Amino acid sequence: MILPKITLLFTALHALLMMVLVYRVVAYRRGAKIGLGDGGDTRLLRRMRVHANFIEYVPMALLLIALLEVCGLDARAVWALGGTLLLGRLLHAQGLSSTGGVSIGRFWGTLLTWLVILAAALLGVWLAWPLG
């Protein structure tokens, strides 16, 4: 049985990044005494969006990578997908944390994340087709 240890490592690293992102929301919320929503505070809204964007994309990407690893995708490809996703999420978090507008980190972070999901999805179709 193939154990997805590479994906486990990248999932753990993404979980640590997620904890940093959510801590930034909670700490700001407590300091600003905003219990629910963003209270009209654009800085809190931006921190919430950094965390929410992470939650919107990372689970599907990691699920695809794990399934590819279990299905026998070459370890180098699994490392490349996981590393690219982590780099993309770090760039995105840094870019969106700095500005709500256009930034290089946000652009490259989004692009790398989308490319990982697209590549993983296409690899999944290729590995699974034809069924049986």
Image: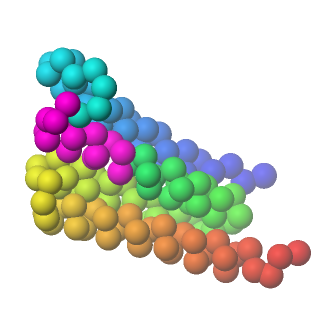
Query: In this rendering, does residue 15 appear at all?
Result: yes
Residue at the image position 66 percent from the left and 76 percent from the top = 125
Where residue 47 sits in the image (x, y, percent)?
Answer: 23, 40
Residue at the image position 18 percent from the left and 26 percent from the top = 28
Q: Residue lying furthest right in this view?
A: 132
- Asked if residue 58 is positioned above or below residue 21 in the image, the reply reads below
- Asked if residue 29 is positioned above or below residue 15 in the image, the reply reads above
Task: Locate residue 125 relative to residue 94 in the image: left or right.
Answer: right
Residue at the image position 22 percent from the left and 22 percent from the top = 34
Where residue 1 sits in the image (x, y, percent)?
Answer: 78, 52
Task: Locate residue 33 relative to residue 71 in the image: left or right.
Answer: left
- How many labels were placed on the picture? 0
85 or 37, nearer to the observer: 37
Does the magenta segment cover residue 42?
yes
Task: Locate residue 41 relative to residue 59 in the image: left or right.
Answer: left
Does the magenta segment cover residue 128?
no
96 or 115, nearer to the observer: 96
Query: In this rendering, does residue 23 appear at all?
Result: no
- Asked if residue 105 is positioned above or below residue 132 in the image, the reply reads above
Q: Quadrant of residue 91?
A: bottom left
Where residue 26 sits in the image (x, y, percent)?
Answer: 27, 25
Residue at the image position 55 percent from the left and 45 percent from the top = 8
Read off the magenta span.
Answer: 39-53
